Image (cartoon, grey):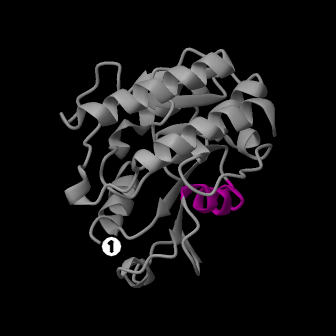
Amino acid sequence: MKKDLRISVVIPVYNEKDTVLEVIERVRATGMISEIIVVDDGSTDGTREALDGVNHPEVRVFGHEKNGGKGSALKTGFARVTGDVVIVQDADLEYDPREYPVLVAPIAEGKADVVYGTRFAGGTHRVLLFWHYIGNRLLTLFSNMLTNLNLTDMETCYKVFRTDVVRKINIRSKRFGVEPELTAKVARMGCRIYEVPISYYGRDYSEGKKISWRDGLAAVWHIIKFRFFK
């Protein structure tokens, strides 16, 4: 891996006061991050107050007055990155920052422009909801049909980009539609996309999981929309 590669991490946050500080510390503990950009997306549970206590030079915190959704938070974060590579990190402990070296390697080796961490290729994962799993696979299949990719996990949080790639993407989705939007746009750009297996420590809804079947239906529309429109 190139030692001079500067890595930025963007963490969109909404009502994650119990986990966000630990996520930041786990990211810092990797020892490979140049900057951490946290975007509080209008939290109402004390998350912003918890973030006010963060005092590390590599961590920058930005806030939205109102909740706009994950897409809105990523748009804010992407506009402020200064590194060569951008990693998207959720704030809920479902994804393990210790896997950053595996995620970044294809880009650092000059093979890839974009890397997805797939939860469905053999990594350790918590056994959870059957229909949630089926929904993820169907959305990925439908996305693949329209983008002509062969991804196994389009909806994954762990997406890694060369910064020059995200500079060319104008995010229009507000909520979780950002996942198919990003996928459609990097496919249209002809980016070299790799997948690597990752672990997944999923939550159920009683533990704070936010995505719902409504977001799944919206994703279908976003897959169609961003296949044919910019």
> Is 21 positioned to the left or the right of 108 in the image?
left
Q: Say above or below: 58 vs 177.
A: below
146 or 1, nearer to the observer:
146
Instruction: Look at the image and say whether residue 57 sits in the magenta stretch.
Output: no
Q: In this view of the protein, can residue 223 be seen by the observer?
A: yes
What kind of element bears circle 1?
A: loop
Q: Say above or below: 76 vs 95.
A: below
Q: Say above or below: 100 vs 60.
A: above
The residue drawn where x is 51% and y is 76% is 42
Residue to which mark 1 is pinned: 17
- In the rendered structure, which segment of residues is drawn in magenta? 70-82
Q: In this view of the protein, can residue 185 be seen by the observer?
A: no
Instruction: Look at the image and say whether residue 76 sits in the magenta stretch.
Output: yes
The residue drawn where x is 67% and y is 21% is 147
The residue drawn where x is 34% and y is 68% is 21
Spot occupied by residue 52 in the image (x, y as percentages of width and height): 44, 83
Spot occupied by residue 37 in the image (x, y as percentages of width and height): 55, 63
The residue drawn where x is 44% and y is 31% is 117
> Mainly helix, strand or loop, the magenta region?
helix
> Is 119 positioned to the left or the right of 64 in the image?
left
> Is 118 positioned to the left or the right of 66 in the image?
left
* Residue 162, quarter of picture: top right
Spot occupied by residue 38 in the image (x, y as percentages of width and height): 51, 65
